Structures are given as structure tokens and as C-alpha cells.
Amino acid sequence: MAASTPSSFAAFWTAFRHNRGALLGLWTVLVIACIAALAPWLAPYGPTLTDNQVFLTPPAWQSGGSAAHWLGTDAIGRDILSRLMHGARLSLTIGVAVVAISVVLGCALGLAAGYLRGVFDMVVMRCMDVILTLPSLLLAIVIVAILGPGLVNAMLAVAIVVLPHYVRITRAAVLAEAQRDYVTAARLSGAGHLRLMLVEILPNCAAPLIVQASLGLSTAILDAAALGFLGLGAQPPLPEWGTMLADAREFVLRAWWVVTFPGLAILVTVLAFNLLGDGLRDALDPKLKR
Amino acid sequence: MPAAAPMHPFAPLLELADLQVDFPSDQGVLHAVDGLSLQLHAGEVLGILGESGSGKSVAMMALMGLLSFPAQMRATRMQFAGQDLLHASAAQRRAITGKDMAMIFQDPMSSLNPSFTVAYQLSETLRLHLGIDARAARNHAATLLAQVGIADAASRLDAYPHQLSGGMCQRVMIAMAIACQPQLLIADEPTTALDVTVQAQILELLAQLQRTHGMAMVLISHDMGVVSQVAQRVAVMYAGQVVEVQEAGALFDAPRHPYTRALLQAMPQRSQGAKRLATIPGMVPGVADRPSGCLFAPRCAHAQTACNTPAPIHRDGGSQVRCHFPLHPLGAIA
Amino acid sequence: MWRFVFTRLGLVIPTFFGMTLLAFFLIRLVPGDPIETLAGERGIDAVRHAQLLHAYGLDQPLLTQYGIYIAKVLHGDLGKSIITQAPVMQEFLALFPATVELALCAMLFALLLGIPAGVLAAVKRNSVYDHGLMGAALTGYSMPIFWWGLLLILLFSVQLGWTPVSGRIAVAYFIEPSTGFLLIDSALSDEKGAFLSALGHLALPTIVLGTNPLAVVARMTRSAMLEVLGEDYVRTARAKGLPPWRVVAIHALRNAMVPVVTVIGLQVGVLFTGAILTETIFSWPGVGKWLIEAIARRDYPVLQGSMLLLGLIVMAVNVLVDLTYGLINPRIRS
């Protein structure tokens, strides 16, 4: 059910439009993306600018707070609002990068496995089984433990963890299509395998891939934040939301705002992507509609 | 062809007046049942004939109280065995449903719960409506299975639905329906999903049970052959309305409504060696193109200008016809 | 059915080998000298290096090493912790009950709240309950666990002072560990107030860990129920006059539970993931916290061993779930 012709896209958009949750998700994602893109100009301060005079200032509406720091400051005087905005850039970049890597790699593996079958297929699927069986964070932690903590390694780890989903979708599509007569006909007439895979088979799994990718974005952001919280992901002073929470743990008693806002940012972003993903799924496949 | 229905001096068992069932949707309101009025006497067999989308199933589901969201139902009158169903509470209706008024459906294999045995599903009805204990219910269930012609009933009791054939599943459904000796049995396309050989058996079973128990029966079908075998009176439905009601024999020999005649002519058995089978041109009106006058007018060979106004219903005893210009005249206009 | 069991068990073998392979290569993938990684020492001189090489069996061919590793794993020997020098298996077994207790409570929490929520949302489809419950479920599903834990601590422990901040039981109590499950052990002991203390310490971690599974169970139950409620056999159940609670709770739920049970089993992996974070926040002495500490201290044998063990446990649970599914589904059972 590829949304390639104008009429099917129009049908998809009508269905999507009716889903208020999905629209809300879409708008929120767009707002966050704008904030992320414009962060260097929107944010009142630099994300790493420290000022020991104003450390642990409460948010503007509480006593002790000031309009200079709307959401307060952290333990070394950095403005939380600015850090959140720059953190949006990080989180969205992480999400997109992770999904991009895993989609490309996953599709490649899935196409190859479904097309070539045999031993290669078996090995790939067993590997995917192992990855799926292992608890996701556990595997990510182990990968980062091997490679060393850091943002890039964390992204790689999360990409590997979500890989099996894309492999399965693509492989299933290949298996379904490979039976069809036109594939046999094309092969007999000498059409290249690669062309066949990309042009004929891939569009058939576009819909589930899109849905999985959208939901994958939210998983990526959550998992990367978890790694950051554990000290294994983005390292300070990067303003990644999870990393911000790691620093904040000790201030639960004294400064609630240091703990609340970064987590809220994660929640809103992930929720928005999930709403979007659910809406895409409902609009693209009526059979799955609730 | 069964004998003609005798005259009834008593009050009818079932009275439906002006039943309306609507399904609101994004494209507009679908009038699934549009002003249906029917009467049924005790022990009588009524056939309801119509294409899919004619509202025949929906009407009976409304009677049984089985309509679900987003259906909207209203009626001037809905009386069964002297009880007013329109103003009865949900609990009062449930006391009748499955006990005095029962229904069997089109696809027997999916109509039985796959996770429970035949014995469980039969006993459930018995224990609910007759209040008997588990042991007695099981024995009774075995008797019922024998009544519906299942050989070796005792061993079938502990079977799961997927272990039974379609015909057997339908027999089990019938057993569940007659378990509490209902006064009315509604059969909605009971043979459509079955093999041809089994169809005849099931119809024969239904006819025999109807005679033995003396219950009234409504047989819904799109297949004239099925209806003609069992029904004494036949109602023909089109696009949510009843267009004709007559005794079965009279209906097939001399239909009064052009739609009925067109249906009869379209039967392959009646093609009389013609090169092409007759069809009815056009399509059943949907939500968007419902005529304001007679619903059949766009497709009727006899349509005239007067047919752009809603057709009047002519009644005479148990017969009716909804047409401006019936093919044969019928008593007074209601 | 036995064929089904054996086929399913057969699939376990490649996964087992895959996991042990991963664990085996883990140490060797760490940048740097594997000897240094395993021994936890830096700047080892040549003599000691040769000694350790032999002691760890790294002078053997790779395949032999792998074979020895598998043999050791099957005997329960997963090496020794670099920091404590205690056998990894021993430490794991000592700490695992704490994690299991937490995970079980969280799952129970998720089921007790999630299933009724899903059923309610399905039965009252598109109502305010439905939208509200599903909105809450989506929020719970999108919630970063570590933040949710901190938030709850902030609210209930700091602001309201209702619950403790960390640990399994108040420091004042010393309970003899017999089952390893503090709830059971404290209930069996003579210490007054111990059980309540253990319960109080479990409260917040259970809620935190159980929120994600709760959301998944609620959503899954709703969609399974919606599908089942539209099935023919539910219509039959209503046609029998069964009260609504019976239709939902017995006929519908029984069939809806099948996909839900599968999902529950698959949640085990998610629970372990969540446990790592939850234990860190609440200083809950389970394998999750142990794992995190091991990373910080570069205790690779612990990392390798606990990864393998947790992976194998999840695999075992998946197999159990598949087998249970086979038992529930009558089609496979017979």
C-alpha cells in the first residue's frame, strides 16, 4: 500500500487528518523541530555557559527565581531553558541518525536475507533473534561498555538494538513478493537483482517501515536518554536530556526543577512521536484501525 | 410447498410497526431498515427474501436486541407474545432472548466460541434460562443433539467447534436455539455458508422441528429456492423496505410488485432456454443516491411520473404491496 | 502437540549458541589486550602475561576456547568477578531474587490494572473512558522510567514522606534470607513491622517498573477485546440472552487473553531493561544495579556473565510463553 499515487496519498491524508491525537503529535514534532533548528538563536544563553553566582536558581514563578532564567539554573549555574533547547537538537539528531542507520542497514540485511535465502538467511535471522531476545538496554549497555561511553557509540548501540525490526519487515516483504510471477518473469528476462529489489519489492514494505521508523524515533530518543542517564551516552557538558538527569539526581531534595524539566522534555517529545507513529499506522493500514 | 397458512382469529405473536434502523456515517445516514411493518402468528413460517443490503438481517437483529454501535433504532410498535419490547428493560429483554425468541446465523463455524466445548455452550443456555444444574444440563444437551440429527451425540458433547463440520456446527446452533422451546425461531441465511448437499438436510431439519414444536419461524434468505421450500408467507424486501408480502404460492405464481417479478425472472431456473439470463438493470441505492419517491423506481420497467412520490402500502389481511401501480390489484389502501 | 513442543524447543538451540558466542566474543572485542581485560590489571610484565595466557586458556585455538567456554557455562561456571573475586554465578544467584521479586510485583501491578483498563476501554469504545485510558496508557508508554522514578521519589518520599527513598527494607531490620524474596522472608520472620517495611519499600519501585508494562497490557487488551467483541460468537452469546458481564468476561475475554498472554511473556525482556534503571534509582540491590556498578569498575566477567544469564532467562521465558500459548489454543492442543 505505497502512498505513491496522488489519490492514495489524499486518502491517507484524510484518514490521518481525522485522528486528533496524530495531528497533535505532528504539530508538537514540528514545534520541537523548529526549536531545535533555531536553538542557537532562540536560546537566551549558551548551553555550556556557567555562572557560579546563580547556581540552583528556582524557576521564574517561584520565590528566588528571576525572569533572567525562566526555568531556573542547574548546579553550576547553567540556564536550563537554553540547555533544553539545545538538547532538542541533540535528541532529534540522535533519533534521526539512529533510525537512518538502522533502516538502511536493516533493509539491506532483510532484502539480502529474503532474496538469497539459505545459510545466509538463517545466520542473519538467528543473529536477529539473539538481539531481540536480549533485553534492549542490556545489549546497548554492553555494546557501549565495549566501545566506550560517548554519544556516537551510544547511537550505534541503539541502532543495533532496533535493527531486527527493520530486517524482519523487509525480509517478510521480500518473501511475499518473491513468490510472485512477475519476479520470476523479470529474472528470466535478465533484470538485475538489485534493480528488482529496490524498484519492485521495497515499495511494498514502505508502509510498515514508515510506521516502524516513526515509533523507532521515540525508542531511539528514550534509549539514548537512558544511556545518558547511566553515564554511558552523551557525556557532560553536552546538554542531552538524559545526561542532564544524571547530574540532577543528587538535587532531588533541593532543586526539583533540575529534575523535572529535562524529563518532561523527553516525555513530550517521545509522546509526540508515538502519537504520530500511531496515527500513521492507523491511516496507512485500515485493518489495524482500532 | 407447504400448505397455505390458516386464518388466525387470535392476536399475532409478533407485531412490528414502522421499524426504522439508521447507521450514521461520515457520508451520511444509511437507512438500513426504513418503515418496516410485519405481523407473525404463532406457528407460522414467514420467509424474508431480499438481496444483501436489503435490511432483512438488520431488521431481525433489531427485534432480538442485537444491534450494536452506531445503529439507531426506533419503531412505533414492537410486541412479542404480548410483551412490549420497546419499553422493556434490558433485563426483561434478556429473559426472552434465547428462551422464547431465538436466532441462528449464517456462518455456523464462526458463530460458536472456539474456546469452549459444545456441551459447555449448550449447557450455558439451559442453565441460564431453565435454571437446571450442570448434570441435568449435560443430559439435556445430549438429547438436544440427538433431536437435531447428530449421531453419536454423547461423544460430540466434548468436541470443540473446529473439530466439527459446517453442517454439524449449524446443527449445534439449532440445538442451542431450540433448547428452551422458543415460540419464535429466526434463521438468518442458515444454509448459505454450507455445502449444497448439506443445505437440503438443514432445511428439512428446520421444517421438521418447526412442525414438531409448533414454533413460529422467520427464514431469511436471498435464495428463492430456500424460501419456497419452507415458508407459508413470504415478505420481499428492497433497500430497507418491505415491498411485498404474500402467501408463498401466490407470490411465486403472480407477484404483485415489479421487483418481485424481476427477481423471479432472474432466476436461472426460469430462464426458459433464453440465450441470456435476465438481470435487473441498475444498482441498489446507497447512502448518497436514495430516491425521494419509490425506491425501486429508477430500475423499474413500469415506472411513471407518479413514482417520484413515496409509494403507498396496499394491505389486505396478511398481504401487502408497496407500489403505485401493483401488477395485480390488492384490497384497500392502508 | 508433542511435535509442536519439540519444534519450539529445537529453535532454542541456535539462539543459545548465538548468545554464548556473543558473550564469548565480548571480552575479545574490548579494545586492548584481552588479558588485561580479564585480569583487570594494567602493565603486566611478560612472565605474568604468559602465565595468565595459559591460565585463561587463551593460548588454545579459538574453537577449543569456545568449546571450553560452553562446557563451563553448562556447568554454571561463568568466571570470577575481578573486583570481589567471587564466582559470577554465585553473586548473580544471591542478587537475582531481589530483581525477580521486583519484576513479579511490577508484572502483577501491570496485569491487575492493565487488563480491566483495556476491557473497560474496549467495552466503552470511543467514550471519554476509552480516550482517557488510552491517553494515559500512551503517556505511560512514552515515559522515561528513570525520570518517572525520580518524580515519584520527589512527590511521595520527599514532599509527602510516605515512602522510603531506597533499599528493600528499613536498615533496622535484619531478615534471614531463606527464599530471597523479602516479602516472604519478612512475613515469616518474628520481627514486627518487617513485612510492612518491605512492602513500603516495594511500593514505588513496583509502580515505576510496572508503568511501561501496564501501558502495553492495557493497549493490547483493548485491541484484542475490540477484535473479539466483533466476532460472530459474541453475537451468538448475546443472542442467547446472556448478561453483558458474562459475554465480556467469559466469552470475549477468554479469547482475547490469547494475544495478551503472548505479550505478557514478551514483557520479561522489557522488565529486565527497566529493572536496570529502576534498581539504579532506588538503590535496589538486584542484578541491574550490580551490572551498572560492574561497568563503572570495568568488571568484564560480571558484565559477560550477567548478560548471558539474563539473555538465557528471557529466552527460557519466551519458550514457556510459546508452549503455554499452544496449551491455551485448543486447535494446537488436540
Image: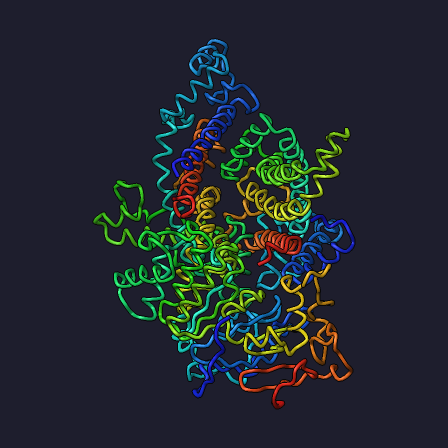
x, y percent for residue B193: 53, 57
C107 up-or-down from A101: above or below: below
Q: Name the one closer to the observer, C266 or B107.
A: B107
C20 up-or-down from B15: above or below: above
Determine the residue positioned at 47% across, 23% down.
Answer: C40
x, y percent for residue B212: 37, 70
| Residue projecting furthest to the top | C47
x, y percent for residue B26: 67, 68
Q: Is residue C299 visible?
A: no
Determine the residue positioned at 44% across, 49% down.
Answer: C261
x, y percent for residue B293: 71, 81
Q: Name the one closer to the observer, C40 or B24.
A: B24
Q: Is residue B171 visible?
A: yes
How is this picture coloured? rainbow
Occupied quadrant, residue C334: top left
Q: Is residue B189 left or right of residue A112?
A: left
Give the quarter of the figure containing the C terminus of chain A. bottom right
Occupied quadrant, residue B312: bottom right
| Residue projecting furthest to the left | C190
Q: Please state the total of marks drawn on the protein image.
A: 0
Q: Is residue A73 left or right of residue C123?
A: right
Q: Name the one closer to the observer, C193 or B209.
A: B209
Determine the residue positioned at 61% across, 78% down.
Answer: B244
Q: Is residue C155 left or right of residue B51?
A: left
